[in-house]
Amino acid sequence: MKIKFDKQQYQIDAVNSIVDIFKGQSVKVSNFSVGAGHILGQQQTELGIGNKLELSEQEVLENIQKIQVQNHLKKSAAIQDWNFTVEMETGTGKTYVYTRSIFELNKKYGFSKFVIVVPSVAIREGVYKSFQMTADHFNELYPGQYCHYFIYDSSKLERVREYATSNNIEVMIMNIDAFKKNENLINQERDTMNGKRPIEFIQETNPIVIIDEPQSVDNTDKAKEAIASLNPLCKLRYSATHRETYNLMYKLDPVDAYEKRLVKKIEVLSVNSDDDYNDPYIKLINVANKSGYKATIELDEKKKNGTVNRVRKQIDPNKKNNLFLLSGERDLYHGYVLAGIDCYPGNESIEFENGRVLGLGDVIGGMDGDLLKRYQIRETIRTHLDKELKLVYKGIKVLSLFFIDKVANYRAYNDDGTWGHGKYAQMFEEEYMSLVKLPKYQTLFKEDSYLTNFDVSEVHGGYFSQDKKGRFKDSRTTKDGSLRSNKDDESFFELIMKKKEELLSFETPLRFIFSHSALKEGWDNPNVFQICTLVETKDTFTKRQKIGRGLRLPVNNEGRRVYDENDNILTVVANESYEEFADSLQKEMEEETGVKFGYITQQVFAPITYKDENDKEQTLGYEKSEKMFKYLLEKNYIDKKGKVKESLKQDLANEKFNVPEEFKSIKEDVERVIKKSIKKLPVFNGKDKINIGLNKEVLLGDEFKQLWDKIKFKTTYSVDLDSEKLINESVSEIKKLDPFRSRKVKRENALLKVEQSGVTGEGRTMRVYEALEEERRLPDILRYLQEQTNLKRRTLVDILIKSERLKDFKKNPQAFMEAVMKIINREKRKLIIDGIKYERIGDHEYYEQSLFENEELVGYMKANAVQVDNAKSVYNYIKYDSETEKAFAEKLNNDEDVKLFIKLPGSFVIDTPLGNYNPDWAILIEKDGVEKLFFVIETKGSTDQEDLRLREDGKITCGRKHFAALENGVKYDVANSYEQLKENV
């Protein structure tokens, strides 16, 4: 099985957000040649071939600001040492994005030297494996662009020279530890390199440095110096959890990733004991000695109103140490006075004056800790098998991942070096063999099943580091939590990183993976559907790190990505309540990403669009957004930091929210932005899960038949493109372009100073002047535009001549070509939609009713599902994607005029030039008790054309034309509320 890669628009957007930083950089023939051909966009150096940047800082800064406005991000005021940041949620393909950026930067500007710097062996191996997996994919996308990638190895320094002298795309992958110390071989003079230091060959190439997980790479001054020593043209920074966001160019935060279904949904299955307040309950959570010995415990506290709650308290020998007082004077805690705290690794514990000793994670009273872990293991296996029942016949292999506190709990060693099962492995095998015997799971083990003959010991396995005797061990970590690079770890990571696709094969029996800190970073697998945490709170893993191992969308046995949201659910089996898990995960995300749940920023309204007095689309912008922010502050709807107050939530819910007169036309858009800002992280409670059932009585009824017979027929489309209109509209827009400035040339003078430490420049002066037009070798603009627009040369010649802007092409060829290309493609897209025609194919091409029977829907009460009248819908619950859809469904359900309403299945799609389009609702309304009206409705939080973007607007236009072509009285419309629909009835 080989994983395949799809085109994802958000990834293309992230790539373009970096590539467009260098917009205006010309790809031109250089003044030297290698072999028979010329090198594009590069320069010859003493030691090889290097990247060449022609743009001035001001030109790059202008590009940066344009991209940031387009991506609705805060504008940068400076270059910030040529650092550019991309923030992408775990599991959304940041490695793919920066790899594709390498190819695009080479294709557009000729840049060919890249260094990828990573913090650990795990990530280094993961990056290398990613290059291997995507090699064929990128060869197809970029034919003729050969990319040579390799891991830096200090024993093979000749590769560094080859890297410097090659005229192909060269990518060197290296650990920060490989070059940040003076004693590293890369920083030492070598006779085999003519007395040069290997790093000098890299410096001469002026590489583009890509930093993977910069919060763990250049988080010290020494590391920053090491990065600077590479002499980078620029530094591209990629992570989900940046500590510093220099020049933020693209952002895909956790909420966006979950809402756009780019990662799996998260479901929490809580496994904990019922609270029993009749016995003393004490659990040791952690111990510390940073500023005096302290411990955190969990106990039952009596409140003033008499209720008893389970809470966490910090205790120390000198102050808070009497649990009788800390519990609200509950008699059960008499005698439990802290006597001492032991923080020694492996022996963490506390002792009470009554002689009782409590180890880390241990409990006095309540359920035994091992019994609770057994229940967790059982529920993980049960959930795993349930998903196998559903997914194995779709060709999707299910994996489960356990995080454990000690390797010895899974793999126990004897003094003679032999080993056996630890307690977790024993629990697993006992629970697995017990569950697989249940009748429910027998279909998984029938003769034609992949699980027919299996050995339970092959179903589970441990992924740990090994010591020199071959024993598994707890991986050592650095202070920042990243894995230390050592030979034992390297051998382990080589095993796991190079067999991801083999692990996904049904032929490989392994399905349950136990790990210590070895899988903390640098590894994930798309088919991890369960994560179980058999670890106490002291664990150095954050919840984000744990769930990050399973967020990526799954693949089937053909290696194709699966997008069915009913299947794409990551179940976290936790030993805490759903509320505790969700709250702590949300806090981690706020701390790590800067996303503030329940906060509004000053620039949050800037992307909203409106039509000015000339009926032209305009963006609200930062100044007006700030004005709206101040209005909310004055109305006491938010505090100075932007935190939303209860008064704003209530006024929104009661439809009492108003805006100043100048914002009246965009009131609904302002409300939509605020509602999104106050959303919580979409984590679902496993106990609220419901299977959405089909109501066959309605499906087979007359009213459904009447409605379905109106909308079920398929159509085909053709496009009539008006060439003259395309030329005229393009010319009109090109004439409106701002004037183009000529390319600037920099001239620097400096007095060279030669010292023991090296050669430096003093007294530097700079002069900037315009390049002479006659010195410029102009690129083939017609060839470029043909490739980018797919239009005939004659059409393009007409557009260019009539625009009367060719002088600007001479001033700045690359910027002019790109601006013209964007205008032509935008106008072409509009005219394609305007000129599209749909025709019904005939009576025998239609969507079958089985679309409903084949859909297996899963929802969560209180989160994304609402119960409806069984007589009015084909489903007993409606699954909604937004509060707008929820309100729409509830009002449809309560309206006596509505006889039937259907949430159209995802497989009901209309073919359009912009991709498949799936409308929201089909509705049958009875007017005045006699006339029956049939509607297909698209529900949107806003019906503003620009807000829906050209792509969504185009799909809606195609939807209108599709249903009009059916010629059977179905009315297609867009509504942002049920009231708007009723007005049109």
Image (cartoon, rainbow, N blue to C red):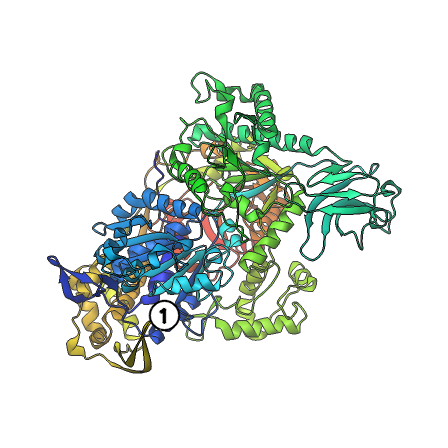
Whether residue 504 appears in this view of the structure is no
Kindly identify the residue that appears in the image at 60 percent across and 21 percent down.
434
Name the spot of residue 715 as percent of width and height, x first.
34, 43
Number of marks in picture: 1
Split into 4 quadrants, where in the image is the N terminus?
Answer: top left
Residue 593 sits above or below residue 535 on the image = below
Q: Of residues 11 and 890, which is closer to you in this image?
A: 11
Name the spot of residue 48 as percent of width and height, x first.
22, 61
Q: Of residues 739 and 247, which is closer to you in this image?
A: 247
Q: Quadrant of residue 378?
A: top right
Q: Residue furthest left?
A: 36
Q: Of residues 650 and 6, which is closer to you in this image?
A: 6
Residue 872 sits above or below residue 955 on the image = above
Whether residue 286 appears in this view of the structure is yes
Residue at the disc numbered 1: 63
The amino acid sitting under disc 1 is Asn
Q: Of residues 677 and 651, which is closer to you in this image?
A: 677
Name the spot of residue 185 as percent of width and height, x first.
34, 55
Name the spot of residue 634 as percent of width and height, x first.
65, 74
Kindly identify the residue that appears in the image at 29 percent across and 58 percent down.
198
Q: Is residue 799 left or right of residue 953?
A: left
Neighbours of disc 1 within 10 Å: few (<14), some (14-19), many (20+):
some
Question: In what element is the residue under mark 1?
Answer: helix
